[in-house]
Amino acid sequence: MTPSQTVVSVEGYTRTVHHSGNQYFATAEMAEIFRSKALATVERGETELIPLLHSQGVELLLVSPSTVFAVVTIEVGRPKIG
C-alpha cells in the first residue's frame, strides 16, 4: 500500500502533506516542522532531504526550489455553507 492509498483511522493526524504525487498524513506539529524546514530550504535556493514523521513512519522528502509541495488541514464534518 502506498502512502496515497492509506486510510487513516488514528486520531491526531490532522494534516496532509502532498509531495511528488504522494500524500502523507501527519500531526499538525510534524507537518509544520516539515513546512518550515522546506520553506527555509527553498528560500535559500538549496536542495535538501527533509524528514517527515507521518502515520506510516518516516520519509526523507527531497525539497528544492522547483519542488511542489503542500500542507493541508484535514477538515471532516464541516457544515455546508450556502
Image (cartoon, helix red, strand yellow):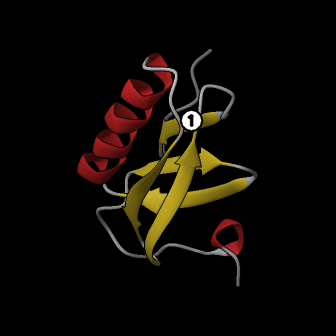
In-image side of 30 versus 59 (left or right) = left
* Residue found at the very far left of the displayed protein: 29
Q: Nearer the viewer, residue 16 or 10?
A: 16
Residue type, mark 1 in image: Ala
In-image side of 34 versus 25 (left or right) = left
Q: Is 81 rendered above or below residue 49?
A: above
Image coords of residue 58 (percent x, y): 41, 72
Q: Which residue corresponds to the image point at 38% horizontal and 52% vertical from the top-left? A: 14
Image quadrant assignment for residue 55: bottom left
On-image quarter of the N terminus:
bottom right
Image coords of residue 46 (percent x, y): 50, 30
Q: Is 17 rendered above or below residue 60?
A: above
Image quadrant assignment for residue 40: top left
Q: Nearer the viewer, residue 73 or 77?
A: 73
- How busy is the neighbourhood of tag 1: few (under 14 within 10 Å), some, or many (20 plus)? some
Image coords of residue 68 (percent x, y): 67, 33
User: Mark 1 highlights which residue?
Assistant: 70
Image coords of residue 15 (percent x, y): 43, 48
Q: Is 24 rendered above or below residue 32?
A: below
**Label 1 secondary element:** strand
